[in-house]
């Protein structure tokens, strides 16, 4: 197993674990999330977007985020073009989220986006289950 496959396994599991965390924790504890987002918006339009569309529909938004994270995780753990689609969704997602975060967290999201971009350089002809089967 090469470094690219190891990276995509870690990334895919990261997205699936994030989905579980958001489903079982964040959905019932959204106050901190919105406080962080509202404190770090850089443009008035972003604040209006959060206050008028996102926060009033927070449960639906969190469920949509969970679905997105599950889809990204599953795509990254499959094979072929689906991995690349999952990685592109992941890059777009971390860049979108970064605009609502403190500077220190933005750096982490940019690094995660760059790592996903590096994973795009490889072709993935086996699913994670096939890789595990070959190892065993």
Image: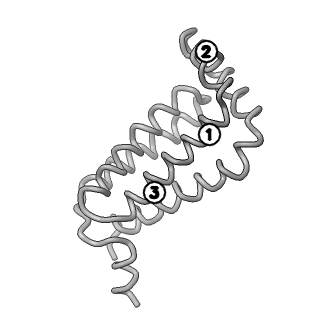
Classed neighbour count for the residue bearing mark 2: other residues with Cα under 10 Å, few (<14), some (14–19), many (≥20): some
Furthest residue toward top: 44
Q: Quadrant of residue 44?
A: top right
What residue is pinned by disc 1? 62
Which type of secondary structure does the marked residue at label 1 adopt?
helix
Which of the 4 image quarters holds residue 34?
top right
Residue 110 drawn above or below residue 10: above
Circle 1 residues within 10 Å: few <14, some 14–19, many ≥20: some
Report the Cα–Cα distance between label 3 and label 1.
16 Å
Q: Name the residue tied to disc 2.
A: 47
**Front one among 60 and 55:** 60
Q: Earlier in the sequence, mark 3 or mark 1?
A: 1
Residue 54 placement (x, y as % from top left) = 61, 25
Q: Of circles 3 and 1, which is in front?
A: 1
**Disc 2 to disc 3: CB gap under 8 Å:** no
| Residue identified by numbered label 3 | 73
Marks 2/3: CA–CA distance: 29 Å
Q: Where in the figure is residue 7, as x and y percent of width and height?
A: 41, 62
Q: Residue at x 36, y 51 (%)?
A: 86
Marks 2 and 1, how far apart in space? 18 Å
Q: Is residue 28 above or below residue 106?
A: below
Side of 51 where 46 appears, left or right = left
Q: Earlier in the sequence, mark 2 or mark 1?
A: 2
Disc 2 versus disc 1: nearer the observer: 1
Q: Residues within 10 Å of mark 3 (few under 14, many from 20)?
A: many
Of the numbered discs 2 and 3, the one sitting upstream in the chain is 2
Corner quadrant of residue 56 = top right
Q: Secondary structure at mark 2?
A: helix
Indicate the position of residue 52 as horizontal and vertical percent values. Answer: 63, 15
Quarter of the rendering occupied by the N terminus = bottom left
Q: Could you tell whether 16 is left or right of 29 in the image?
A: left
Residue 125 vs 117, above or below: the answer is: below
């Amino acid at each position: 197993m090469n470094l690219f496959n190891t990276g995509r396994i870690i990334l895919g599991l990261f997205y699936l674990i994030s989905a579980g965390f958001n489903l079982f924790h964040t959905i019932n504890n959204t106050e901190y999330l919105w406080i962080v987002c509202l404190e770090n918006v850089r443009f008035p339009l972003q604040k209006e977007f959060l206050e008028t569309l996102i926060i009033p529909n927070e449960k639906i938004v969190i469920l949509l985020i969970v679905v997105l994270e599950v889809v990204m995780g599953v795509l990254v753990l499959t094979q072929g073009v689906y991995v690349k689609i999952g990685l592109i969704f992941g890059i777009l997602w971390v860049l979108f989220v970064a605009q609502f975060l403190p500077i220190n967290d933005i750096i982490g999201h940019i690094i995660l986006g760059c790592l996903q971009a590096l994973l795009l350089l490889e072709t993935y002809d086996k699913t994670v289950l096939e890789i595990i089967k070959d190892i065993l």
